[in-house]
Each structure stands twice: as C-alpha cells, then as structure tokens.
Image (spheres, grey):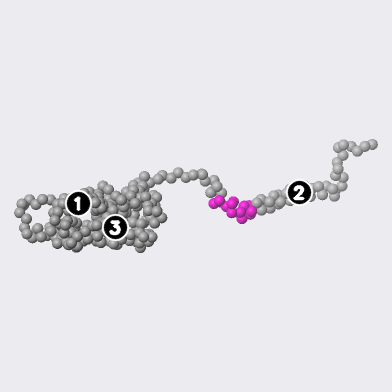
Amino acid sequence: MGRSEHENPIKTPKQLIAVVALAFLVPVVIIVLLSQFMANIRRVDKDNPAMTNEAVAKRLRPVGDVVLADAGGAAAQVQRSGEEIYNSVCSACHAVGAAGAPKIGDKDDWAPRLGKGQKVLVETAIKGVGKMMPARGGNADLGDLEVERAVVFMANSAGGKFRESGEPAAAAPQKSASPAISAQQKSAASATAIADGKKIYEAGCIACHGAGVAGAPKAGDKTAWAPRLKTGIDAIYASAIKGKGAMPAKGGNAALADAEVKAAVDYLVGMAK
C-alpha cells in the first residue's frame, strides 16, 4: 500500500525537538539581521555630509526668498554729499594724482580745468576720458547729480566757485537804508572786491593770463595791458563777459556771475597799473 497523504513527517522525538528549535531560532536570527542592517544604514547616513540635518533642510528650502527692498535706499544714496562720493570713489586717483588726475586741493593742477567751466568738467567726468579716467570714476551706479557733486567738491577745494544743481545762488547784498557811505565802508568794500577778484583769477583766469597763453595779456605786464586800458574798463568788462577772439565768455566758466567776472578784471587791471 502507498503512503497516506496525511501522514505526519515528524516521527521521532529528535525530529520534533529540531523543528521546535528551528521555529524559535529562525525568527530571532531574522530580527537580529534586520537590526544590524538598519543600524548600518543609520551609520552611513550619519557619516554622509549630504544626509546631515542641515543639508536636508537646505534641500527642502524654497528656491527663492522674498525680500522687501528699502524704498528709500536709492534716494538715500543720491543724497550723499560731494565729499562722501569723493572719499568712496574719486579719492583712489585724485588723492595722489594717479594717472594724471588733478590732485585734490592742488590749484596748479586744477587751474586749466577750472577754466573750462563746470558744465564741461561734469560732462567729462560722466563720459570719461580715454583710458586715463573711466566714465563716472569707474562706478557705473553713480547718477549724474552725484558725479556733479563730486566734481563741485574737488573743484572748489582748489579755489573754484562751482555750485551744485539746485543750489541757490549767493544772496545779493542788501542796499543800505542810508544813502551816505562812509570812507571806511568804501575801503572795506574795495578790499573785499579785490580779495574776491584774486580768488576768481587764481581759480580760472590764471590758466591763460598767468603765462600769457593764446595772446592773453599776462598778469602784471603793463605793456601788454596798456592798449586794453585805453579802451576803458567797461569795454574790458564786456570782452571778459561775452568773450573776444581766443578768449571764451567768462573765461570758459559759465557758472560765474557778471559781478564775479568784473571782480577778476578789476584785480588784473589793478596789477597792471
């Protein structure tokens, strides 16, 4: 007869013990192996820089951040003074006269440039000059007004009388309520006019009249000034204000008031008498 399909494979006590032992040990071995496997995974993650908490948090951050710009930032920058702009941008060259830049406060360096006038100097600073001076001093973020302020600061440090755009002109002197002027007052006014004329001359006129450039009558040269003095002071005033021949109007400085030009003429004429 054949073996019964329902015959029990365990026939001896040893087989029963072996089956019970395996039933107990196999799950334990599986649990131990799984524990070691998970521990190894955690250790690998811990040693991997890409799996640190910081690295994971960084990867989970949004692609961009929303930043609210300070609406007053640009306005605050425009409000910088000419001296502040000079210190932060222009001083790199103008403090020491690098690459032929006119040194700050050096009247000899600035004299021929002041003679060209404020408008020309500002336009030159904005556009630059070849390889010697980059446009806007090398700072493309500077606005035209900031460049002008820096130019005015540097020019005036060398004796110029430039004014920033929007800056009010000097107030005209008030007329005295009394029609009579004492001799002492006249003397004081004359001394002031001479001092102002000298400053204007040294700030711009000296570029040509200091050495007699382009036929300009040299300061203090009586022979050169003699024929001009014969035409009368009003004629000399008119030539200086409107320009004549090689001499540009107002000596090339359109920012000068007529009274300032006349003061410079008075100073030059005084030296030639």
The amino acid type, in three-letter code, at marker 3 is Pro
The residue sitting at 6% across, 55% down in the picture is 181
Label 3: how many Cα within 10 Å (few below 14, some 14–19, many 20+): some
The residue sitting at 30% across, 56% down in the picture is 113
Mark-to-mark CA distance, 3 and 1: 20 Å
The amino acid type, in three-letter code, at marker 1 is Ser
Residue at far left of view: 180
Q: Nearer the viewer, residue 170 or 29?
A: 170
Query: Which residue is under mark 2?
Result: 26
Query: Which residue is under mark 1?
Result: 239
The amino acid type, in three-letter code, at marker 2 is Val
Question: Which mark is first along the chain, 2 or 3?
Answer: 2
Which segment is the magenta one?
A: 42-55
Query: Which residue is under mark 3?
Result: 112
Query: In the image, is 40 to the left or to the right of 237?
Result: right
Query: In the image, is 134 to the left or to the right of 253?
Result: right
* SS class, disc 3: helix
Residue at far right of view: 1
Of the 4 image quadrants, the one containing the C terminus is bottom left
